[in-house]
Image (cartoon, rainbow, N blue to C red):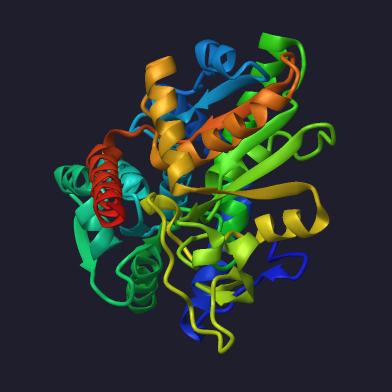
Amino acid sequence: MKTHYGTYGGQYVAETLMKPLADMAVAYDEAKADPAFKREFDEILRDYVGRESPLTVCRRLSAHLGGAQIVLKREDLNHTGAHKVNNTIGQALLARRMGKKRLIAETGAGMHGVATATVAALFGMPCEVYMGAIDVKRQAPNVARMEMLGAKVHAVEEGSATLKDAMNEAIRDWVTNCDDTFYVIGTVAGPAPYPEMVRDFQSVIGVEARRQCLEKFGRLPDQAIACVGGGSNAMGLFAGFIDDADVRLVGVEAGGKGLATGEHAASINGGRLGVLHGAKTMLLQTDDGNILDTYSVSAGLDYPGVGPEHCHLHDTGRAEYSVINDDEAVAAFDALCRFEGIIPALESSHALAEAIKRAPSLPKDTILLVNLSGRGDKDMENIMKWKESRRSASGSSAKSEG
């Protein structure tokens, strides 16, 4: 089991959870060495999820920008509409292998909750999902999907009522019920072995993309770009190219209303070292170590920490981490809709926005590979409300100036 990435990672948890984590690590090491486990995992990804997901060249958008070629890895086409299901299938298989009877999960944008509820239904296991009350309201379609699939959704009112608080409640549940319950963490955060395990289950993204680029273009992409909240879709993409020094790895954090405002969720660019949810990582926190409230138009990136391996990749210089604000993300959302007929998740729109920024100044034979981690059906009401609030603010400003 890999417990640390440089200074980051570890297991900062209650004594109650040390044995469940140790048991999980042993079970996962055994599962990795078992060809039957990998065979079943691959079979479900193929026959149930619909993998492999294709590459799509954004011809009209790239021509409009006049520079590099933007290529999408289409995780939005997976069953459930995002990359999350790759990981939930792997963890559900491990839970069954360990004899666990019940699944729990945290969720922000709702896609991990939907993916966990989906595999729980597939494997015939009860499922409970913790979701911040604010996210329950702004991601109502996914709440309905989870409930339709048989999961019980808990709206968490404590704290900022977003992803951080949902994860706190899920951990409390796990501490109380660890004998029969498996906690399906949705990202590469949390105590070991979760960062390694989630990355491994998501590495199918990068492994596929690497081979597909060689087949389609005869070479690797120049840059691999993905959004980063906790960072699972990014680590999944990066895993395929981590040993290819010529491929630049680019993580994109949520800048919200701008770093200077303090209303953002950019833990690497705006945080400091601390401990959250069982791991040492970069956090948005006060001088006294209190966790700050975060903000992003995207519920799935609205988290005050980040996976420990991302922090290590940043420190070593193997990956770079930029910041995209709400305005830029929504503009990228609109651009992909209008130029390519694809409605992206707001999370993925941050990665796309970074590619849109970079493309015009790069040669036309440059390939920018963007992980389109999910589809945007869940975001339609949120986008409309956000645009309406901007129009109202603009109207109020014009009146005051007049």
Q: Is residue 41 visible?
A: yes
Q: Which of 46 and 241 is in front in this view?
A: 241
Residue 302 coordinates in the image, percent (x, y): 42, 58
Residue at 48%, 78% (x, y): give it: 291
Q: In which quarter of the image is residue 333?
A: top left
Question: Please, is residue 201 above or below residue 73 in the view?
Answer: below
Image check: 313 left or right of 126?
right
Residue at 66%, 24% (x, y): give it: 360
Question: Please, is residue 292 above or below residue 84 in the view?
Answer: below
Question: Please, is residue 77 above or below residue 127 in the view?
Answer: above
Q: Which of 322 and 235 is in front in this view?
A: 322
Residue at 46%, 32% (x, y): give it: 332
Q: Can residue 96 be seen in this view?
A: no
Residue 373 coordinates in the image, percent (x, y): 47, 36
Q: Which of 147 and 296 is in front in this view?
A: 296
Quadrant in which the N terminus appears: bottom right
